[in-house]
């Protein structure tokens, strides 16, 4: 119930912030690559708001960063572990060095985030570049792979599954080509 309340509070906050701004200020925030709270603090006429709004933005960004960082690291560790021990026996799985994996994924993620901070690309392009291929992977490619891997899903195998898989590949490649051309 706490998670549902948290999502509701965040969505109320997002909608109220977005609805309090004009379309022109939203375009200006996107063009300057700044968040909406910073844009509101630039427009505020009260001195205490100019101090409070960046503080709220900083706390929100830091808490969101650590939540996403830990979740992404756990997911990445799980995927690498699964791939590394795909056909391994129980002894190999028990001997797997989880601490070393966590150290390397943390170092790689911090290096990647450092590069993002240095080059400062537009955040909406990053979200688009990651969400479209991941959604195509979940909606098209993974169900077909599961039909091949899970025996209970064998009843869903048809000739159309190859077409669905192909559409997934076309979606991923098409987005990549459209983004970089």
Image: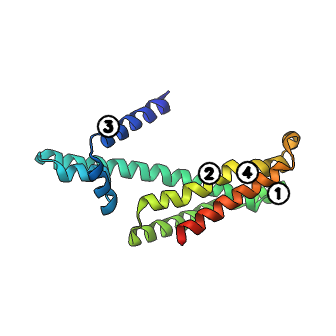
- The x, y position of residue 29, in whole percent, is 30, 56
Can residue 104 be spotted in the picture? no
Which is more toward the observer, 173 or 134? 173
Q: Which residue is mark 4?
A: 142
Does dot 1 land on a helix, a strand or a loop?
Answer: helix
**Which of pointers 2 and 4 lies earlier in the amino acid sequence?**
2
Residue visible at 37% across and 51% down in the picture? 61
Q: Position of residue 76 (x, y in %)?
A: 62, 57
- Label whose residue precedes the other's in the sequence (1 or 3): 3
Q: CA distance from mark 1 to mark 3?
A: 54 Å
C-beta proximity under 8 Å, tags 2 and 4: no
Numbered tag placed on residue 16 in the rendering: 3
Comparing labels 4 and 1, the label whose residue is closer to the camera: 4
Q: Which residue is at 86% across, 50% downward? A: 159
Separation of residues labelled 2 and 4 (CA atoms): 10 Å
Pointer 1 residue = 91
Image quarter of residue 102: bottom right
- Quick one: SS at disc 2? helix
User: Of circles 2 and 1, which is in front?
Assistant: 2
First in sequence: mark 2 vs mark 1: 1
Q: Residues within 10 Å of mark 1 (few under 14, many from 20)?
A: few
Label 2: which residue? 135
**In the foreground, 45 or 20:** 20
């Amino acid at each position: 119930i706490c998670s549902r309340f948290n999502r509701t509070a965040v969505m109320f906050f997002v909608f109220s912030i977005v609805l309090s701004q004009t379309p022109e200020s939203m375009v200006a925030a996107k063009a300057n690559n700044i968040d909406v709270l910073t844009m509101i603090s630039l427009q505020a006429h009260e001195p205490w708001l100019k101090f409070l709004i960046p503080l709220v933005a900083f706390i929100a960004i830091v808490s969101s960063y650590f939540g996403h960082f830990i979740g992404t690291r756990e997911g990445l560790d799980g995927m690498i572990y699964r791939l590394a021990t795909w056909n391994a026996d129980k002894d190999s799985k028990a001997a797997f060095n989880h601490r070393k994996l966590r150290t390397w994924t943390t170092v790689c993620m911090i290096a990647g985030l450092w590069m993002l901070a240095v080059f400062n690309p537009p955040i909406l392009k990053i979200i688009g570049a990651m969400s479209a291929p991941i959604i195509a992977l979940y909606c098209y490619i993974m169900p077909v792979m599961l039909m091949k891997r899970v025996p209970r899903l064998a009843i869903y195998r048809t000739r159309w599954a190859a077409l669905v898989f192909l559409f997934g590949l076309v979606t991923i490649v098409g987005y990549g080509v459209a983004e970089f051309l």
